[in-house]
Amino acid sequence: MTKLFIADLHLSEARPDLTNVFIHFLATKATQADELYILGDLFEFWIGDDEQSPLQQQITLALKTLSEQGCRLFYSHGNRDFMIGKRFARECGMTLLPPIYSCEIAGERTLLLHGDQLCTDDEAYQRFRRITSWPWLQWVFLHLPLSRRVKIAQQIRQGSHKGKQQKSRSIMDVTPSSVNDCFAQHQATLMIHGHTHRPMIHELSLDNGQKVRRIVLGDWNTDLWYLQIDDRDINLISQPIATTE
Ligand code: LP5
Ligand code: MN
């Protein structure tokens, strides 16, 4: 049983090279896997399943083709594409996961999540996350014309970019006590997430002495990153993007 995990591709019209590499990945590496987990931020931003841009159509077709070939697809929302809905998931043949998904992987109780939930020292971001999760606000947003939605998303991206310049590296990383509590609450020993763009396999001890592993996926920018789990064999792999085309 081979499972692949990816996150933070941030696909957009501005990076056709990334889109091509991803489509190549889906048509080659992913076809050899039984399951592919996309742990958020597949897109630079998502403003509604009704957008149907050429990029969206291209990605939908590639994911649908993979799912029809027998690879099971799972999606966990990121902080950029939390508006991905059931329609897009259905069109791609993907199952949407809850914000923290607990399952059995490599013989261990495992948590799958985007990772932004664990950055609790970043209070401005957590406030932003809470507000944008309000269903009525999402409803209003989804009923705006697409051009308005694009503008708002771009403004938020700019605001976020500026905000990040004022924040320290540690504030934008996961908060250790939140990681500890998350493992303990779910009685898990393995956690897989993205978001921080700091790919690494961390081995740590919880406050109660339990040994656990936290695996952070890398973002796709100069390199592509994926985690491959074959039964109990775990490998975090990267490849330079230029040479994979
Ligand atoms: O994404 P990344 O890694 O650059 O930064 C994140 C946090 N930023 C965000 C915002 C996203 O980048 C953009 C999301 C676009 C969504 C489009 C759909 C909108 C739907 C609305 C539905 C109601 O998540 C950043 C973290 C960082 O990770 C590290 O963890 O620090 O958090 C922020 O920067 C949040 C800021 O601190 C506060 C938000 C500023 C928003 C300003 C809005 C101004 C314009 C409003 C116009 C209406
Ligand atoms: Mn993210």
Image: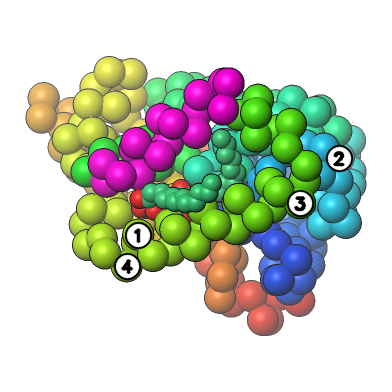
How crowded pointer 1 is (Cα within 10 Å; few <14, some 14-19, many 20+) is rated as: few
Q: Is mark 1 within 8 Å of ligand 1?
A: yes
Could you tell me if the residues under marks 4 and 2 are in contact, i.e. CB atoms within 8 Å? no
Could you tell me if the residues under marks 3 and 2 are in contact, i.e. CB atoms within 8 Å? no
Q: CA distance from mark 3 to mark 4?
A: 28 Å
Q: CA distance from mark 4 to mark 2?
A: 38 Å
Q: Amino acid at mark 4?
A: Gln
Disc 3 versus disc 4: nearer the observer: 3
Q: Of marks 3 and 4, which one's residue comes earlier in the chain?
A: 3
Q: Of marks 3 and 2, which one's residue comes earlier in the chain?
A: 2
Q: Amino acid at mark 1?
A: Gly
Quadrant of res 92: top right
- The residue at the point 50 percent across, 24 percent down is 134
Quadrant of res 221: bottom right
The magenta stretch spans residue 40: no
Disc 3 versus disc 2: nearer the observer: 3
Q: Mark 3 sits on what residue?
A: 147
Q: Amino acid at mark 2?
A: Lys
Q: Mark 4 sits on what residue?
A: 165
How crowded pointer 4 is (Cα within 10 Å; few <14, some 14-19, many 20+) is rated as: few
State which region is magenta: 122-137
Q: Mark 2 sits on what residue?
A: 64
Q: Position of residue 33 (x, y in %)?
A: 71, 43
